[in-house]
Image (tube, rainbow, N blue to C red):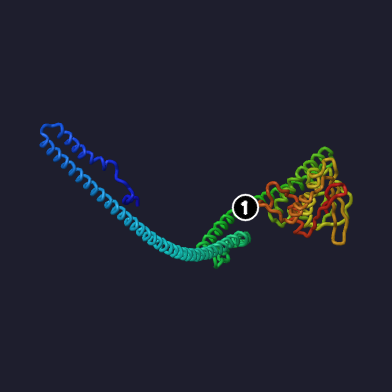
Amino acid sequence: MELATPPPAARAPVAWYSWWLMPLGLGGGTVAATFMSSERISVAVAGVAATAAGTVCVRLLLRTRAQLRRTEDAHRAAQAEHSQQWQQHVAGLERKFSTERAALDARLTEQARTYETRLSEQARAADERLAEQAAAHETRLAEQAGAWQERLDHQMAAVARLADEQLPDAMRRLRAGDAIDDILPTVEQCAKVGADLQAELRKVLRTALMGVEAEFDRSTSAEQAVIGVGNRIHVLTSKLRGRLHEMQGEHGRLPSVARGLMELDQAIGPADCLAASIGVLGGSDRPGRQWQEPQRLLSVMRGGIGRIKDFHRVQLRHLPELGVDGGLVDHLTLIFAHLLDNAARYSPPTEPVVVSGKEVPNGVGIEIQDSGKGLSEEKKREAEHALAGTSPGPGLGGISEDASIGLRVVGALARRYGIRVTFADSPWLGTSVV
């Protein structure tokens, strides 16, 4: 501390000595006044008394001042000691506070570490529990998804079976004449498909069959009507051509009449061929006209030539002298007519269509050659499908609006009588039909 007593060597200040000047001055004044005054005794007594009083006052003043100084020094010493004690006390409190603070910090650190450890363990446990729950949920969802997928697969399989197997089979049986109520009980149902879906599928199948049956009835009625009209036209054209032949025998001596009758016969030929084709496509087994006696193969071929428009382009090279059964004549004539018409239609109008034939070990082979562009592989496949009756078509006999009727008629008759028809490339860069 800075508060302390002055050192012993310290000297009194000058003001301490100046206080004695006052009694000295009074004494000097008294002496001067005594010698100068007439009343020396009273002045001397008064001067001595004033001087003594001043001396006493100065002495008291200096003593009091010294006491005040000692008191101040003692107070300063006590204050310094008290300040030192407070400093020691504060230092002790600071040390105690530091110790307690260190202890509290250590305790807080330990508690924080404990809480962190506990929180990490709880977080780890929570993560594990959440992972287990998530795995359980994923497993449950996977099982549910698998069950739904399996159910959906069975439903899709049931719908596919309905579309691919049951409906075509039911339509085939319906076309064969079975009733709808007889077809539905035999439809196989899957045990893994719900009863509701099975009922709806049966309802769909029943509705489809009812619609198909209605279409079959309308189509059958229309086909029967068309077949009936075709047969009637064929009968009428056959009678008309027979009458024309009689008239040619009666009036054949007149060239102009014979020419007119021949042109009329040639004009009726395509209509007669078309009417006969309608009957064949409709499933008619009976020819329009039958002969009791066998007919020459050459006459049958000429009958086919007479039924086409471009008859004048057909050249007959050679045919064997054979007879054709009377019941086969009309349909064989129809086969020749359609093959010759195709050859004439798909070749240049100035080129001939050459017909030749010969006997072979397994029957008779007749070849028709044209000079057209020939058949591409795609067209050849279409022709083969038409001959085999396998090309699709919703109309009469499976033909559509833009399909060729001739090859379908030829294929139907060929399958009925065991005739084989093949296509090949002609040496004349056209098509050869055997």
Q: Estimate the x, y position of residue 290 in percent, counting from the top left.
A: 76, 55
Type of the residue with mark 1:
Ser
The answer to whether one can see residue 326 in this image is: yes
Judge the density around disc 1: few (<14), some (14-19), many (≥20) Cα neighbours within 10 Å. Answer: some
Residue 18 occupies which quadrant of the picture? top left
Q: Nearer the viewer, residue 45 or 75?
A: 45
Q: Is residue 181 left or right of residue 293?
A: left
Q: Estimate the x, y position of residue 208 in percent, counting from the top left.
A: 57, 56
The answer to whether one can see residue 193 in this image is: no
Secondary structure under the numbered disc 1 in the rendered image: helix
Q: Nearer the viewer, residue 34 or 360?
A: 34
Residue 190 occupies which quadrant of the picture? bottom right
Q: Estimate the x, y position of residue 48 in percent, counting from the top left.
A: 15, 40
Q: Nearer the viewer, residue 227 or 292?
A: 227
Q: Estimate the x, y position of residue 418 in percent, counting from the top left.
A: 78, 60
Q: Is residue 399 left or right of residue 200?
A: right
Residue 244 occupies which quadrant of the picture? top right
For mark 1, what is the residue? 219
Q: Nearer the viewer, residue 72 or 266?
A: 72
Q: How many marks?
A: 1
Extreme bottom residue here?
Answer: 191
Q: Can you say whether 177 is above or below 275 in the image?
A: below
In the picture, the quarter occupied by the C terminus is bottom right
For image coordinates 29% across by 52% down, the residue present is 79
